[in-house]
Amino acid sequence: MSLRTPTELELQRTVLIADDESSIRLLVHATIESDDYTVVEASDGAQAWALAKELKPSLVLLDVQMPGQSGLEVLRSIKADPGLKATRVILLTSKAQERDIEVGLIAGADFYLTKPFSPLDLLTRVEEALEL
Amino acid sequence: MHYTAMIIVVLIAVASVAGLVVRAMSEQDARQSATADAAFASRVAASQIAAHLLLLQQTVGMVAANPQSAGLLSSPAGACTLPFAGAGPFSIGHLDIIKSDGTVRCSSKAFSPGPVYGAASWLPTAITRSVTVAPFLDPATGRMSAVVATPMAGGGGTVAAIMDLAQVGSNLGSALAGARQLEFLVTTDNGKTVLTRSLNASYWAGRSLAGTAFEASSPSMERSDVDGTMRLYATSPVGSTPWLVYAGADAAAALAAADLSSNRDLAIIVGGAAIMLVVIFVVYRRVVEPIRQLSLVIRSSTLSGAVGTVDAMGASEVTGLAEDFSKLMATVKHELVERLNSEQEAVVSERNYRTLFEGHPQPMWLYDTETLAFLEVNDSASDRYGYTREEFMTMTIRDLQRPQDVPKFLELQAMPMPALDRTGPWRHLLRDGSEIQVLTTSHAVIFGDHRARFVLAEDLTDSRRLELELVESHARAEHDAELGRAKDEMVAVVSHELRTPLASIVGFAELLATREVTPAQRKEYLAVMLQEGRRLTALVNDFLDLRRFEGARPSMRFTPADIKALITRAVDLFSEPGGVAITMSLPDELPLVRVDGDAMFRVIANLLSNAHKYSPLGGAIRVSARVVDGMVEVSVQDKGLGIPAEALPQLFGKFFRVESPDRGSIGGTGLGLAICKNIVETHGGKIGVRSDGPGKGSTFYFTLPVVREEAQSGDVLIVEDDSGFAHLVEAELQTRGLSSIWAADAETAGHLLTGARAVVLDLLLPGLSGEAFLHHLRATRGAGIPVVVVTLKDLGAAENLSLQKAGVTAVLRKGAGTAAAAATLITQCLASELVAI
């Protein structure tokens, strides 16, 4: 828990985790937990989009298969929103959904990780994305 | 035609005969008539002559008697004249007063002086009384005359009237000859001398008949006249004179008249005949012929030929009749042709249908729905079933049923059948005792006066089955392709579902392995790993179950079951102390259902588990069962979270889970209800859900078919929860000719005791124990039923004793060969009806 007031820059450094599975959210959160940015969680697509618009996160870790609004729909919304140009997106997918990966990359995702993924690998990708 | 000719011939003959007869009769009539005319004429002539002679005599007598006459005798000749006008036919002549010397003293005419009549026989010297003398050649006139003379008183003279005879004949002819031109011939001297004749009178007066044709011909009625002409004569005497008056009609003329008359008659007859002929012809042409034609037409009017017409040449009545008849015939023929056509059509149509029926490659028959007797069968039915048509006619459709199917069959027959009904497959008995499987399509018909059904039997045992199999294999191939696609989808879904827990487990394990974590973190991570590991296990199990119930249906073993026992056991499993209260609302009597006990238990348990899971705040769960439309319906009602309406249709799909914040922490694989749906549908039932929406609770229900009465009995009742072992025993009993019925628990077995002659009993049963069932059996059925116990249990001495007391035939420990041993024991017991341990 940080006691100092977040700077403007720091305010932008928010990472949004969007996954319907609480265990995955917990794993991702535990993996990328850092003082350098704030981690926010969303449990479905609609929530993820609402938070993304509000917080303008630097990075979104987006599960492709979510009930309601899917990860790909959220991705398209982000990429279509001029205010979110700086937001990077990493897709979390099951390996079988290769077509989803392809579609996601075309739609503007920066990277993807296949479940089950290595937490260390995930952390590396997050840091790369945030240019830390 | 021929009798028209005959009529004409007869008429001609009759006319000829009539002509001859008429001619003969007419000749005779002519003779008689001519003769009669002649007779009358002769009499008239004779009487005129006689009368006028008398008149002449009186005239002469008066003159003679007159005294003046005597004085005249002495007067000079020619000093006086006498008035004299003749009398009747005697029209020409003269009256004279003649002196006895023959000189005329006084006359009615100028006379020559001298004794003219000196030599006359009638002079007064010769006569003393009045005389009539003829013929006398009058010297004064030179003509043959008749003299009527009377002597004068004193004898000095004679008064004489001297009349011209030729004139008399002429007068008679002109006065009396009449139309017949009668000839008058007045003769004297016995007919030898002619006095006068009406024809050629001057010649014949006073002439002798000697040598004439008249004289030569026989003095019969018809004789020749003096000229040679044949005449019909009649004769009359003239007064007191010897004179004869002959009146003769010309025979030829008379006969000619007769001919004329007879010809006229003939002409009348022939004319009449001709008129008759014409009439006959006309009648024939206009009446007889048309009627004959009509009759011919009537006679020759056949139903097959054209209707004859009658020539319209007869009388209007006949023509009308003919027309009427023609119309009638046409109408009749039209009607008949119509009827024949329709009958023919009916015959053709019937023949066509019969051909369709007879020649149809599939067995067909008609049967009476009341007596069930066959009314008609086709050739294919005879071929397939082996009975001749005649044999079929003595049979009923019941005879095709296997004995064990008869009750069910009769029950079905007793129920109202739809107009068109397709049922099956049925097993039908052939004549040789073998069986075939058929699908029957039947519909209600009226056959003659029978209420009948027309049945088409599709033989599934041969080509039709191949065909069906082909269709099925196509369907299977499509189904397989469908399954393949579904499988790919499944793989994707399953892979996702499996990767999520795997990702957590592997991820946290890596964090733990690579990072320094606090004890609290470690504990948290490990808890997640454990939870996700369990989730992974449940998923794998459910998935395997789904595969099992979906793809491997034969692994299910259906048997009659008491659903109440299943429900009760499932409820017992969930009724943990302090947990949710589950209430049961089960009727005392429920029909047995046909289920795989394990699978059905899983369904009930799954529904109870869901009810429990999705009632996080508690709330009563109620399980109930009832009979609806011949099915048993089981429902599980909770007062939990309820289900949003939009989720209802997908609820039984695979991996579907209702998403809502209040169920976030409730775990599940999304496969449970899909599995339940599979199981229930495999049982022939339906599963469904009712919910009034979120927060209003939900009710899951499913239906199961009821076991038919006849499927509830067998020689041997097998009470065994292990379906594999039960099946083994069944097979062993079957090879020994015994049927069996299997109950998976003792509760169900209690319902299946009727009809069982022996029992194979497992002791370790879910719910009620084998021992408890044994007691129930002995209590209800007595000691008469042999019971073989098969168990895995190691029985103690006390237990064995207890079983012996209960009259158990044998106790066998489950192992290889146990099923066969049990079957053998049962067979022996039943064979000897021996009950012993």
Image (cartoon, rainbow, N blue to C red):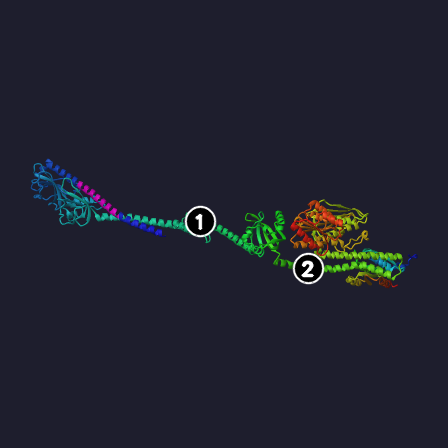
Three-letter amino acid code of the residue under disc 1: Phe
Q: Mark 1 lies on which chain?
A: B
Mark number displayed over residue B325: 1
Left or right relative to B400: residue B1: left
> Which mark is nearer the camera, 2 or 1?
2
Q: Could you say which is closer to the camera, residue B568 or residue B829?
A: B829
Single out the residue that lies furthest toward the right. Answer: A4
Q: Give x and y (percent) for residue B190.
A: 13, 44
Q: Give x and y (percent) for residue B6.
A: 33, 51
Three-letter amino acid code of the residue under disc 2: Glu
Q: Give the range drawn in magenta.
A: B22-48
Q: Could you say which is closer to the camera, residue B558 or residue A60?
A: B558
Q: How crowded is mark 1: few (under 14 residues within 10 Å), some or many (20 or more)?
A: many
Left or right relative to B414: residue B582: right
Q: Is residue B298 visible?
A: yes
Q: How crowded is mark 2: few (under 14 residues within 10 Å), some or many (20 or more)?
A: few
Q: Residue at x 35, y 52 (%)?
A: B2
Is B36 a magenta residue? Answer: yes
Residue B174, by quadrant, is top left
Residue B226, above or below B66: below
**Quick check: marks 2 and 1 in contact, CB under 8 Å?**
no
